[in-house]
Amino acid sequence: MDPITLGVGVFLLGFGIYTFYSRAIYPHKLVKLQAMKDKFGNGALTLIHTIAYSLIPIGAGAALIWSGHKGISLSQIVGS
């Protein structure tokens, strides 16, 4: 197990879940989403915000948690 990779994965997973929950319960708290809605309208920007701030962090977090559990370090994933 690699604790740093697990920690980053848990953080990303938590961030994605938090933004998904906040969008559903308290959408007025998401300043970037409100600014985008005011400028461009409600249409596809909500989908873009959902993908960028919820689905990608949740997927990346899950992948990093799996990698960290298997012993793969974050430096191996990034390729440094």
Image (spheres, helix red, strand yellow):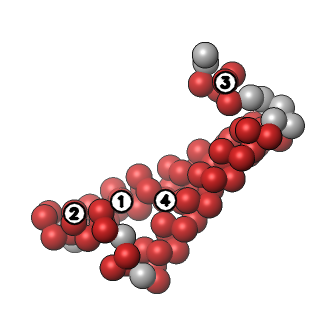
Q: Is residue 34 left or right of residue 13?
A: left
Asked whether residue 64 is in view, the answer is: yes
For residue 54, which numbered disc appears in the image? 4
Sequence-wise, which precedes: disc 3 or disc 4?
4
Q: CA distance from mark 1 to mark 3?
A: 28 Å
Q: Which residue is mark 1?
A: 49
Disc 3 residue crowd, few under 14, some 14–19, many 20+, Cα 10 Å: few
- The three-letter code of the residue at mark 3 reads Ser
Q: CA distance from mark 3 to mark 4?
A: 24 Å
Q: Secondary structure at mark 3?
A: helix
Q: Which residue is mark 3?
A: 75
Q: Nearer the viewer, mark 1 or mark 3?
A: 3
Q: Are marks 1 and 2 in contact (CB under 8 Å)?
A: yes
Residue situated in front as seen by the camera: 34 or 43: 34
Sequence-wise, which precedes: disc 1 or disc 3?
1
Q: Secondary structure at mark 2?
A: helix
> Which residue is depicted at the point 49% across and 59% down?
54
